[in-house]
Amino acid sequence: MTTTTPTTTTPTTAAVATPGAAGGLWRNREFLTFWFGETLSLLGTQVTTLALPLTAVIAFHASPGQVGLLRFLQLVPYLGLALVFGALVDRMRRRRVMIAANAARMVLIGLIPLLAATHLLTIGLLLGLACAIGIFSVLFDVSWMSFVPTLVKDKAHYVEANQKLGVTSSTTDVAGPGIAGALIGALTAPISLVVDSASYLVSLVTLLLIRTPETPPAPAAEKRHLGREIAEGLRFVFGHRVLRPLALVGPFCNFSMVSVWTLFLLYAVRDKGLPAGLVGLVFSASSIGGLVGAALSGALLKRFRTGVVYAVSMTLVFAGPLLIPFAAGSRPVLLAFFVAAFFLSYLGLGVANVVMVSLRQASTPQALMGRMNAAFRTLLFGGGSLGGLIGGYLAGGLGTRTALTGIAVGSALMVLAVAASPVSRLKAVPATAG
């Protein structure tokens, strides 16, 4: 893809050496510091992911529509703001943006237990705070994915970096729901959010400790125009032979995962009578699949063609939910089916995330990294926000089990789109951007 602006100059194929290049990222102190902070932050976020909807369900007896609306409000800022934030982030040093975003999330999440303790928390305030937290999550997300290449300058280490971050995410997926379930059972859902607020404080400290100089954005050759910059990012993504098919399939992946997650929460608590501790146990046990997938992703990419790894992993993501609505029998049998369904989906997602993020980073010049990530976050979380909203309202209109069945069957049909994708025919991760 060619361009006349200096902001999208394609870098040369020569790798840039880093202090940790000889021994991998285990010798890159700055990346390890960032990795540690993100680990604790992600663990705390798992508490919020479970505590917010359970606060609505248990404390306010929320309807399925309200639970879906809560999930929608958490994710809908990605639809309206990710592209704008992505263009702005490409003008700034990303670490400063990340610090501001995490400070805001720490305060907003900390307000929920404070309001609950003073009996001032209402369902309306909870929905508003969920949306505000989502706004700063957008800002952080489009920044950190663009910041990783600052710490890991050698493209040969992108897969390693994303594998490490993927293992972290999957590990917190394993431990987080169980910890969240225990905390919610002991402290109540809103009070348990103190843990998440504290985790963002730790993340702030680790970001302040990072000293890797961040190259300031190059001055624009002409007056900047936000709309043109956003359009430039979208043209790059949808004009790229690898990024375009990833962008088209991604929203359906998130729609499936979030709608199934939202419907399962209602189905498990209300239809099957599972307590919060067992719901957390289901997510913890099944999330081992994500940990296994992320841990194996590097070895799989070395042994098999990138396209094959992508196709098989995405098939697991889309087909896994079929097991949930057809589960029947005693509680142990039901739990086994539920765990198996999410295990398969998370196993595929653990591998697919490493593949997709590595492909995106390797295919994009640094000057467009923020806008590329913003375009994907808009599409991915746009799909997720609609999944939560539509899933909740389908459950209210059709019944939870019927809605789950429809979503699961529709998800499985996406396997056909994955098989037809040109990404499924790739031999390896591209060596150069552009």
Image (cartoon, rainbow, N blue to C red):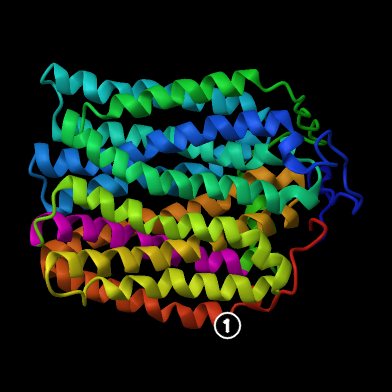
Is 35 on the left or on the right of 17, as rendered?
left
Is 299 on the left or on the right of 294, as rendered?
right
Task: Name the one closer to the observer, 360 or 30.
Answer: 30
Is 348 on the left or on the right of 421, as rendered?
left
Which residue does the image show at 48% across and 26% down from the upper left?
Answer: 102
Q: Can residue 256 be found in the magenta stretch?
A: yes
**Start-end of magenta stretch:** 245-271
Task: Name the one closer to the observer, 86 or 252.
Answer: 252
Which residue does the image show at 47% across and 41% down from the upper left?
Answer: 81
Outermost residue, front direction? 332
Identify the amino acid type marked 1: Ala
Q: Which residue is mark 1?
A: 420
Q: In the image, residue 71 lies at what x, y percent?
A: 29, 48
> Which type of secondary structure does the marked residue at label 1 adopt?
helix
* Up-down relation of residue 136 to residue 414 (above or below): above
Q: In the image, residue 364 lies at what x, y percent?
A: 73, 53
Q: Residues within 10 Å of mark 1 (few under 14, many from 20)?
A: few
Q: Can residue 302 be found in the magenta stretch?
A: no
Dividing the image into 4 quarters, which one contains the N terminus?
A: bottom right
Outermost residue, top direction? 118
Which residue does the image show at 73% across and 40% down from the upper left?
Answer: 25
Residue 230 seen by the camera: no
Q: In the image, residue 421 lies at what x, y percent?
A: 60, 77
Dividing the image into 4 quarters, which one contains the C terminus?
A: bottom right
Which residue does the image show at 23% across and 75% down from the upper left?
Answer: 405
What is the count of numbered marks?
1
